[in-house]
Image: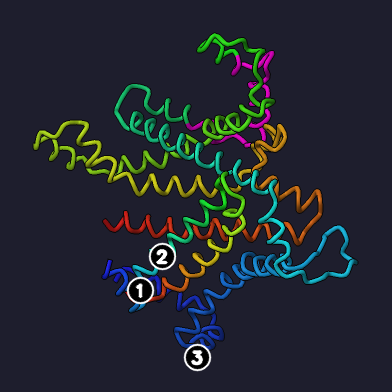
Amino acid sequence: MSNFINGLLRLRRGPWEMVATILIACGVVMLMQPFAMVLFTYSFLVTLVGTVMFIIVSHFPE
Amino acid sequence: MMSDPVVHRVAAATPPRLAHRIRGLSDRTIAWLFVAPTIFLLLAVNIFPLIWTIRLSLTNFRTNRPNNEVEFVGIENYRRILTDEDTWTSLQATAHFLIWTILLQVLIGFALAYLINKKFRGNDLWTTLIVLPMMLSPAVVGNFWTFLYQPQIGLFNYFVQFLTGADPASFSMIGEVRLAPWSIVIVDTWMWTPFVMLICLAGLRSIPASLYEAAECDRASKWRQFWTITIPMALPFLMLAVLFRGIENFKMFDLVVQLTGGGPGSTTLLTSIDLKREAFEKWRTGYASAYAVILFVTVFGLASIYVKALNKVKDR
């Protein structure tokens, strides 16, 4: 866990890609889940943040 | 060098004036000259429409009223889509379709590939027969499955009667809310399982026989060979199949329109059909553009993480 946080602080690709991946996955699940309208409403925002983050952090050093 | 004579022949065939002009250019410039048409095409066909769609999504533009004043509405279209119950229902229908088709196609496709990969009499004939549905037009498949699903005359209902004893006239696959989502899953699985099978077959045939021979020497059981050799080696191919089918089914249109038209009600109204209705039946171009951007970001995000996972599996 400390490695993960260190990686985030030192702007390393691995942990930041992990965060972006989790955001995208959450966004897609929120978009298509049948349980709560509020999750659907904020799904696009979450997916968009995750996708933009993924594009940016894929240029970070390993 | 084998290519030297070819290089000399090409150089000799180049007209002197052109050769003189090219000689004055750097390698980098020549490289750009070769790549420029592709970049221009990419910009014209992909990037420009994308930017234009994003721009339209922030307006109230309607294609059927080109003379109306176009107003900038900010994120209003996005807000309306993301608070719309019907859009939410449509996305749930798409999720149901995606999850079940991919699951069934991967399971059945891999099982078929595993069987076809074995040497037996008539192997080629069976492969050809299995691949046939994939070669048909989705519109044709949609049309003839509507006949197969007819309660009175449809063969499918009689097949279900043969298996379960249910009266064929007692249920309608494409007319009942409960069954319609499954009717499109069945047809898409029937049509596209061969595609997954072919990809899996390529994966299975790429596994070196020496691995199985080594496993036999180590007295590994068939079950263990399957889980420790076959599955890990075929996994990148399976993932590719899932990626292709996922993207294709996210934008599934023709087959479902022919089969159910999105009905009954909106039980099979997939996002692509919903989007087409917004854009070309209700003519809400700005709204439809925002809808398209939402779907694009979703597919793009999913594809990004999927390609990353695929690369990891390949590197392993």
From what the image shows, is residue B53 above or below residue B14?
above
Are the residues under badges 1 and 3 in a single subunit? no
Per the image, is A19 magenta? Answer: no
At horizontal 65% and vertical 14% (from top left) the residue drawn is B170
Q: Which residue is mark 3?
A: B24
Label at residue B33: none
Which segment did they paint magenta? B131-157
Q: Quadrant of residue B204?
A: top left
Mark toward the start of the polypeptide (1 vs 2): 1
Mark 2 neighbour class, 10 Å CA radius: few under 14, some 14 to 19, many 20 or more: some
Dot 3 falls on a residue whose secondary structure is loop
Q: Which residue is mark 1?
A: A8
CA–CA distance in space, label 1 to label 2:
9 Å
- Viewer-proximal residue among B294 and B39: B294
Mark 1 neighbour class, 10 Å CA radius: few under 14, some 14 to 19, many 20 or more: some
At horizontal 55% and vertical 65% (from top left) the residue drawn is A48
From what the image shows, is residue B78 above or below residue B213?
below
Circle 2: residue type: Val
- To which chain does the residue with label 2 belong? A
